[in-house]
Image: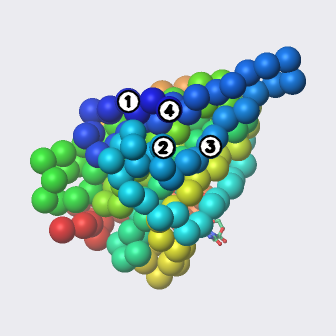
Amino acid sequence: MNVIATELPDVLIIEPKVFGDERGFFYESFNAREFEKASGLQLQFVQDNHSRSQKGVLRGLHYQVEHAQGKLVRVTAGEVLDVAVDIRRSSPHFGKWTSVRLSAQNNRQLWIPPGFAHGFVVLSDSAEFLYKTTDYYTPSAERCIRWDDPELNIDWQLTATPTLSAKDQNGKTLKEADLFP
Ligand SMILES: Cc1cn([C@H]2C[C@H](O)[C@@H](COP(=O)(O)OP(=O)(O)O[C@H]3O[C@@H](C)C(=O)[C@@H](O)[C@H]3O)O2)c(=O)[nH]c1=O
């Protein structure tokens, strides 16, 4: 397993070791001991999520103000551009984002710690998106920052207007949003 740094020091790309043979492939999609050894992080995941989306669907930018979730995300079919934004006011990287292509081909995972907003857009015809979280879904604490907030100026690598949920169409700007201290 390989850990690769991003522009945001707390956000990590994880590359699992994939064993391919004539049957197909095998890899450990999560191993707590190996993850801790490679990243120095001791994590306890409590929820696994799975969503499927069509091309051009954009989900985000999401976070929970209480019960903040760390997320270990990956794609098992198709390709997405995954985005993490540091929304901790005290962070030297406050308001900065990083993006990584995650696909069924590159098997890359992204570790997004609590304190970040997260979103992704589907680049392939469809995508299956799987992730582990360090805290439980808490609807009352859910918040959404606008994907197109000019202050963030995220390059989503889009060629058309994305498809959004009603909730995501009503996201707040970074200036308006409840953030982390
Ligand atoms: C996120 C979530 C949703 N739900 C339900 C609520 C709702 O009826 C339905 C769809 O929820 P949403 O529209 O919020 O799903 P979605 O837009 O996919 O939300 C997810 O987006 C990505 C970017 C994230 O980072 C996740 O943390 C999560 O916020 O599923 C749960 O039961 N548990 C969960 O953990």
Please tell me whether mark 1 or mark 4 is closer to you in this view: 4
Mark 4 → mark 3, Cα distance in angstroms: 10 Å
| Position in image of residue 83 (x %, y %) | 43, 42
Q: CA distance from mark 1 to mark 4?
A: 10 Å
| Crowd band around label 2 with a 10 angstrom C-alpha radius: few (<14), some (14–19), many (20+) | some
Which numbered disc covers residue 4?
1
Q: Amino acid at mark 1?
A: Ile
Mark nearer the N terminus (4 vs 3): 4
**How far apart are labels 2 and 4 at the CA level?**
7 Å
Mark 1, residues whose alpha carbon is within 10 Å: few (<14), some, or many (≥20)? some
Residue type marked 4: Met
Q: Quadrant of ligand 1?
A: bottom right
Q: CA distance from mark 2 to mark 1?
A: 14 Å
Report the Cα–Cα distance between label 3 and label 1.
Answer: 16 Å
First in residue order: circle 3 vs circle 1:
1
**Residue behind mark 2:** 34
- Quadrant of res 66: bottom left
How far apart are the alpha carbons under marks 3 and 2? 11 Å
Residue lying furthest right: 23
Q: Amino acid at mark 3?
A: Ser
Depth check: give the residue in front, 143 or 11.
11
Mark closest to the chain's N terminus, 3 or 2: 3
Closer to the chain start, of discs 2 and 1, is 1
Compare marks 2 and 4 and give the one earlier in the sequence.
Answer: 4
Q: Callout 2: helix, strand or loop?
A: helix
Q: Tell me the tag on residue 1.
A: 4
For disc 3, the marked residue is 29
Whether tag 2 and tag 4 are in contact, CB under 8 A, the answer is yes
Mark 1 secondary-structure assignment: strand
